[in-house]
Image: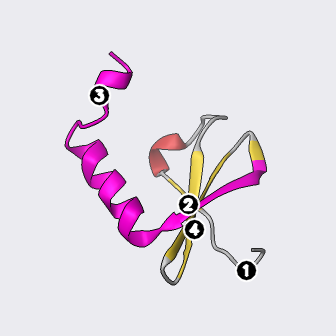
């Protein structure tokens, strides 16, 4: 996985806690800044569905 190009949101600048994502074909990799060795892998289709849901407020009740 050393060939992956990790990206994080520009909104995380100055923050010690953030997530990074990388992709390789149809797979998407997600990791947290506080443990770069623990990586979650999902498909691009599932990740895109999660992003759409988050943008639509589908998960807002978890933080209310």
Q: Which is more N-terminal, label 1 or label 3?
A: 1
Q: Secondary structure at mark 3?
A: helix
- 56 lies left or right of 7: left
Q: Secondary structure at mark 4?
A: strand
What residue is shown with label 1?
A: 3
Q: Residue at x 30, y 43 (%)?
A: 54
Label 3 – label 1 distance at C-alpha: 34 Å
Q: Which is more N-terminal, label 2 or label 1?
A: 1
User: Considering the image in quadrants, where does the C terminus appear?
Assistant: top left
Label 2 – label 4 distance at C-alpha: 4 Å
Q: Residue at x 31, y 34 (%)?
A: 59
What residue is shown with label 2?
A: 21
What residue is shown with label 3?
A: 60
Q: Give residue 26's position: percent from left, percent from top.
A: 48, 80
- Tell me whether the residue at label 2 lies in contact with that at label 4, contact meaning CB atoms closer than 8 angstroms: yes
| Front of the two marks 3 and 4 | 3
Label 1 – label 2 distance at C-alpha: 13 Å
Up/down of 2 relative to 62, above or below: below
Residue 22 counted in the magenta span: no
Which segment did they paint magenta?
A: 36-64
Q: Give residue 53's position: percent from left, percent from top.
A: 26, 47
Q: Give residue 35's position: percent from left, percent from top.
A: 77, 44
């Amino acid at each position: 996985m050393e060939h992956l190009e990790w990206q994080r949101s520009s909104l995380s600048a100055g923050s010690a806690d953030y997530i990074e994502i990388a992709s390789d074909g149809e797979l998407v990799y997600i990791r947290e800044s506080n443990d770069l060795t623990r990586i979650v892998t999902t498909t691009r289709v599932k990740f895109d569905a999660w992003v759409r849901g988050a943008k639509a407020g589908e998960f807002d009740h978890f933080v209310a």
